[in-house]
Every structure is written in structure tokens, then in C-alpha cells.
Image (spheres, helix red, strand yellow):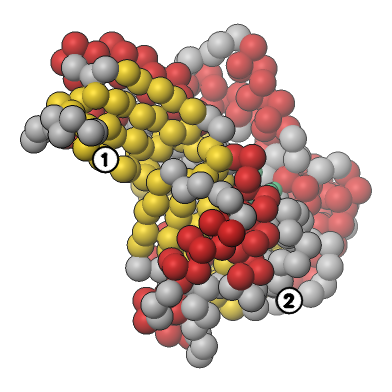
Amino acid sequence: MNTIVMKFGGTSVAGTEKIRNIADIVIKEVKNNKIIVVLSAMAGETNKLQSFLDDFASQYSLESDLVLTSGEQVTIGLLSAQLKNKDIKSIPLLGWQIPIITDDNHEKAKILHIDNKRIEKFFEKNDVIVLAGFQGISLDGEITSLGRGGSDTTAVAIASSVGAERCDIYTDVDGVYTTDPNIDLNAKKIPKMSYEEMLEMASTGSKVLHTRSVELAMKNNLTLQVLSSLTKETGTFIVDEKELIEKEIVSGVSYSKNEAKVTISGILDKPGISAKIFSLMTENNINVDMIVQNISQDGISANITFTISQKDFDLTKSVIEQNRNSLNYKSLSLDKNVAKISVIGMGMMSQAGVAEKMFKTLAKNEINILAISTSEIKISVLIEEKHTNIAVKSLHEAYNL
Ligand code: ADP
Ligand code: ASP
Ligand code: MG
């Protein structure tokens, strides 16, 4: 018998009616397959848990992860109960019961190992394993979470570990679109795309899949399908680049409002200054994305601008301020009102003019570019947040998506 992994996101499990619906979807596959279902918490639940933690200003990661991962315990229990109501042999399991072993980086833990011998044992007496997404256990026995949206990664990791035949990610849209269908009604469903494209889309803000889940699927050459739990339509397949016959020059536009811009002005223009700034960021576990440096008019000092995730805003500010003497800068400014807009496509590697079209389109809409970064198959620009919608829509149109 084949094993298939079916992951259902927050909106698909938001309430008992929805859970009944997914029990029916699961039951259709039970006859011919061993099934591992991976669930998220009900939509909004993890946000609610986070707001309780914020209310206590809790900086205790052990407690934070314990609280944050509790929503999944509810949904797996309910689905398993409903499957049993329908005479399906099912067992609900938390991450530690498999176990899914992670490192101890709370709130962004990485999976180190999955012990699949236990899984075989569970299948001796059950047809369905209902597994809590988003969570694991560290080598020291602490409950960890994989970062927001991390249930996708649980699904891909478990599918890779057991050599699953399929990994289907059920969500509230029926596939991956050329841009977020919730902000541009002209967005079109992409039938098939490469891991690389999906990886760039996810990491630039298309949160339809957790970035690490795509990395892991690519590493293990596991085909993913993103589809809806409400319609019966075929979704989007995410596959190896070799399986794509035609490579779109631009296949999608994504945006992220989760960025903040940091500008340090009047630093000395001499070797070692950037190294010092970015070492500080690394030491404090702050991820830096786009970087722009320019010499100021006096030719002696320089300004450096870079972007960070908004969650690191306060930490970044205090780390730089605490090091004012050694960095010896004139002024520091941080700005949350920015957005990153990216265009992505495999065909970019062989086609010139993609960047030019992007810049011209933004210019025509009087949108100023604050920073630029590129990869082989992606161009990202930083703009003022208020222009996000118009930037996404006009680029979507400019590339005929
Ligand atoms: P789940 O709770 O099922 O994990 P998510 O909210 O994490 O669902 O992901 C689905 C959402 O991703 C959609 O509702 C949509 O707004 C958003 N999204 C962003 N970019 C895209 C895109 N390019 N294609 C499809 N959905 C996208
Ligand atoms: N419940 C978690 C979250 O909201 C994990 C997930 O949904 O993937 O981030
Ligand atoms: Mg998600």
C-alpha cells in the first residue's frame, strides 16, 4: 500500500462542520492507501495564542512554544474522533509522539530527524495517523515550533521520511496563483511550477506555502500539490524544473509587508564597517535581506540601508544604538512603512529586459524604488507600503499574467 500525506490548513479545520468535511475527504483515500493527515490549528487560533503571550510580554521561548503549539492538539483530537465515528481506525499524535526531533531554536526550530519506525508501528493498528503540524521536540525534550505557517513543513518532512507517494496541501485557495488572488482578482492559477519558482515566491511573501517546506520538497524531489479543501479541482503541482516544458519568463508577482528598512547614515567609508554591522546582526539572530550602500557627498562617509523582518524592529534598533560608539555613525532611522515587491520566473535566466519593464512600470505609476535585490530568477524592489496594491496589479498586467 502507498502512503499519502494530506495537510489541511487553518481555514480547512475552522469549526466542526469543516472538520466533518475533511474527514470525508480523508475517507475517500483510506481504502487504497495508508494516510498521514497533518493539521494546523483552527484559523485565527495561533494568532489568539500569540496575543495572550504578547499580553504577558512573554520572552520565555519554552513557554511560548508550549502555548503556541496547543491549537493543533485540539484539531487533531477532533478529526480523529470524527474518523472513528465513521469507523475508520485512526490515532491522533503530537509531534513528540512520533517523535519529530528538532533543534532548540524555539519559534523557528528546524527538523533534525524523524523516527519513522514508530510510524510503521502506528500503522499496524491504524489506517490513519492524524499528526499535529508545526511542532516538534528538541533533543533536551522541550516542545518546539517550526515558525508560523510551519505545518506545511511538517507535512513535507513526514512525507519525505516515509517516502510518500503524494503530499497534498489543502488550503483556502485552489492552487498557487500568479499573484495573491485575494489582492488581485485577475490572478490566474498556475497548473505546474518548479520548486525554484515556488521557493522564490514563498520567500518573497507568497505565504501559500511555508518557505522551508518548499526547500525540503526540492531536496527530496517530492511532488507537492496545492489544492482546495472545498472544491474538487486539480490544484497546482510543484515539481522539478525538468518536468516543465515551457518556462514562463515571469510566472508570478509576490509582495511582503513584513519588512522594515534600516538606514545608518554617516558611517566611515573604510574596510570592515559593513562586516561590523552585519556581524552584530548575525550575533543577534537578525536576518538581513536587501542591502544598499552609497557614498555620501563628502566622499568620506557612507550610508548603508538594509531590510529586516518587522519582528526584529525593536531588537535591531537597540543593538545598533548600543553600539553607537564602535560603529561611529551620525544617525539611524528605521521605517516599517515599506513593502517588498518581487517578480519571479525561470525564463528570466535567458531573457533580457525583465528588470527594465519592472522599473518602467513602477516609474509610470510614480512609485519610487528604495532598494533592489536580484537572483537568477527573481527581481525584488523595496517601495513605500502605501503603493503595494497598485504596484502588484500594474506589474501583473505589464507581464501579461
Ligand atoms: P493555510 O491556513 O491553509 O495554511 P495560508 O493562509 O497559509 O493557508 O495560505 C493560503 C493563502 O495564501 C491564501 O488565502 C492567499 O491569500 C495567500 N497567497 C499569497 N500569495 C498567493 C499566491 N500566489 N497564490 C495563492 N495564494 C496566495
Ligand atoms: N497554526 C500555525 C500558524 O498559524 C501553523 C500553521 O498553520 O501552519 O502559524
Ligand atoms: Mg499556511
Q: Is mark 1 within 8 Å of ligand 1?
A: no
Quarter holding the N terminus is bottom right
Residue type at the position of mark 1: Gln
Identity of the residue drawn at 28% across and 34% down: 304
Q: Earlier in the sequence, mark 2 or mark 1?
A: 2
Identity of the residue drawn at 84% across and 62% down: 230
Q: Is mark 2 within 8 Å of ligand 1?
A: no
Indicate whether 145 appears above or below 169: above
Indicate whether 34 appears above or below 42: below
Query: Which structural element holds mark 1?
Result: strand
Residue 305 seen in the current view: yes
Q: Position of residue 253 (x, y in %)?
A: 58, 62
Q: Position of residue 348 (x, y in %)?
A: 42, 75
Which residue is denoted by mark 2 in the rendering?
A: 234
Residue type at the position of mark 2: Thr
Quarter holding the C terminus is bottom right
Foreground: disc 2 or disc 1: 1
Indicate whether 263 appears above or below 325: below
Identity of the residue drawn at 37% across and 43% down: 289
Q: Position of residue 313 (x, y in %)?
A: 46, 24
Which residue is denoted by mark 1 in the rendering?
A: 293
Report whether 156 appears left or right of 74.
left
Report whether 13 appears left or right of 267.
right
- The total number of labels drawn is 2
Query: Which structural element holds mark 2?
Result: loop
Residue 8 seen in the current view: no
Q: Which mark is residue 39?
A: none
Q: Position of residue 9 (x, y in %)?
A: 70, 50
Q: Residue furthest front?
A: 297
The residue lying toward the viewer, choosing from 256 and 112, is 256
Report whether 152 appears left or right of 303.
right
